[in-house]
């Protein structure tokens, strides 16, 4: 069973990575072609954790699941059609 320190450490690391994504969004706010990214945090289960070998155990912490790029199909289509008119 993981200790509270291990669970807290996983939360701090996941939030640090999510803040890094936020920092990239802020730094590139005026960069043409850059799309905002969202960090998805997920719960660590026993089968995914290095902390425990029990596969049915929950509440072992959190990790960065994936970083998704924001995309709006309507805006992309309207921008492309507006550029083609000129």
Image (tube, rainbow, N blue to C red):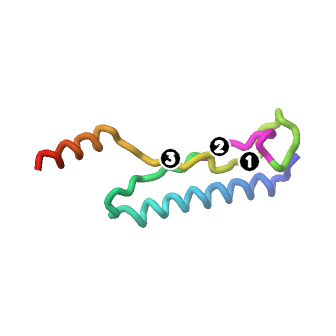
* Residue 33 sits in quarter: bottom left
| Mark carried by residue 42 | 2
Mark in the foreground, 3 or 2: 3
Crowding around mark 3 (Cα neighbors within 10 Å: few <14, some 14 to 19, many 20+) is few
Q: Is residue 77 above or below residue 29?
A: above
* Residue 13 sits in quarter: bottom right
Sequence-wise first label, 2 or 1: 2
Q: Position of residue 8 (x, y in %)?
A: 74, 55
| Viewer-closest of 32 and 25 | 32
Q: Position of residue 59 (x, y in %)?
A: 76, 41
Sequence-wise first label, 3 or 2: 2
Is 51 included in the stretch rendered in magenta?
Answer: no
Sequence-wise first label, 1 or 3: 1
Segment colored magenta: 41-49
| Mark carried by residue 11 | none
- The residue lying furthest to the left in this view is 86
Residue on which disc 3 sits: 68
Q: CA distance from mark 2 to mark 1?
A: 9 Å
Crowding around mark 1 (Cα neighbors within 10 Å: few <14, some 14 to 19, many 20+) is many
Residue at the (16%, 46%) spot, across then down: 84
Mark in the foreground, 1 or 3: 3
Q: Main secondary structure of the magenta part?
A: loop
Residue at the (29%, 44%) spot, across then down: 76
Please give left or right for residue 70 compared with residue 21 in the image. Answer: left
Q: Position of residue 40 (x, y in %)?
A: 57, 46
* Secondary structure beneath label 2: strand
| Mark carried by residue 61 | 1
Q: Position of residue 43 (x, y in %)?
A: 69, 42
Residue at the (49%, 59%) spot, across then down: 22
């Amino acid at each position: 069973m993981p200790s509270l320190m291990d669970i807290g450490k996983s939360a701090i690391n996941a939030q640090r990575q999510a803040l890094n994504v936020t920092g990239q969004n802020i730094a590139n706010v005026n960069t043409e072609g850059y799309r905002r990214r969202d960090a998805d945090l997920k719960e660590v289960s026993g089968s995914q954790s290095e902390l425990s070998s029990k596969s049915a155990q929950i509440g072992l912490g959190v990790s960065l699941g994936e970083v998704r790029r924001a995309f709006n199909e309507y805006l992309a289509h309207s921008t492309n059609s507006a550029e083609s008119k000129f």
